[in-house]
Image: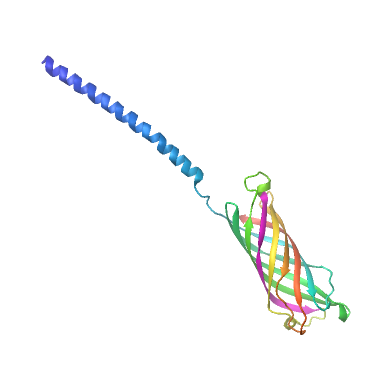
Amino acid sequence: MKRILTLAICFAVLAVANSSYAQSSSSGKLKPDSRKRDRHRRHAPKEPNFGMGIKVGANMQYMQDSRKLFDNWIKPGAMAGIYFNMERGVFGVQLEGIGKTCRYYVKHAAYLHLRTWNVDFPILLTCRPFRQIPVLDRLKFVAGPEISFLVSAVRGDRNEVKNDFTNADVAAAAGIEIDLPLNLHVGARGLWGLVNINNTLPSAEWHNHSLQFTVGYRFLQ
């Protein structure tokens, strides 16, 4: 009987010792795994951020023409539209739909006034080079092509002169935007016309250039 009791006690001690060793081994293995998971979380790629909103502002238009037909002063116009952007890390893409008005004066016709209505579609790359720096992370640079379609062109006497211009224009755009509190942002952008929009005078080059200043509101970010 004593032998049986002694064997039972030995088996119990061995079982407890084996269980304790298994628990200590498993707990020791979990720590490196948890560290690996933490490193994976820190170095995992950032999810893209999506934004959408509206903007309004001033379109300051200037017509450069080879025959000096137009007054070379900048003329104010209006603009308004919507935008959608996606950012991942420092870089992103921004698409816009903008309606704008442009004004021109023809010098050799007693300063004949012209007004055009256009719909623009900028396709812009965005960059936040100071994303990791507080305050400066609100700064965003944009650049890319902008395609513009002429909707209407009217003289001061309300006669339609749309046929004097090409139906489409392409410009190179570049600018800066600054995020503000309350989901607001302000921006300034320059556009350099790349296409001759003259459709009436032979051998004359007309190119649209403009400066745009906008205020926007983000619905989604």
Quadrant in which the N terminus is drawn: top left
Q: Which residues are magenta?
A: 138-155
Residue 13 lies left or right of residue 174; in this view the side is: left
Q: In the rendered image of this protein, does residue 20 appear above or below residue 188?
A: above
Decide if residue 51 is on the left or right side of residue 41: right
Residue in the foreground of this view, choosing between 167 and 198: 198
Q: Nearer the viewer, residue 42 or 111?
A: 42
Q: Nearer the viewer, residue 161 or 205?
A: 205
Residue 152: give x, y in percent of width and height.
Answer: 72, 78
Residue 95, image quadrant: bottom right
Question: Residue 7, image x and y in percent?
Answer: 16, 20
Q: Is residue 10 above or below residue 99?
A: above
Count of picture labels: 0
State how the image is colored: rainbow
Residue at screen point 70% across, 57% down: 176
Residue at the left extreme, as displayed: 1
Residue plotted at (72% across, 73% down): 117
> Residue 103 at x, y = what percent?
79, 72
Query: Can residue 125 be seen from the camera position used here?
Result: yes
Residue 118 position within the rendered picture, expressed as x and y whole percent measured from the top left: 70, 73
Majority SS type along the magenta span = strand
Picture residue at 41% right of the left edge, 36% below the top: 32
Reply yes or no: does residue 132 show up in magenta. no
The residue most toward the right is 110
Left or right of 97 on screen, residue 72:
right
Residue 221 visible, this angle: no
Q: Which residue extends farthest top?
A: 2
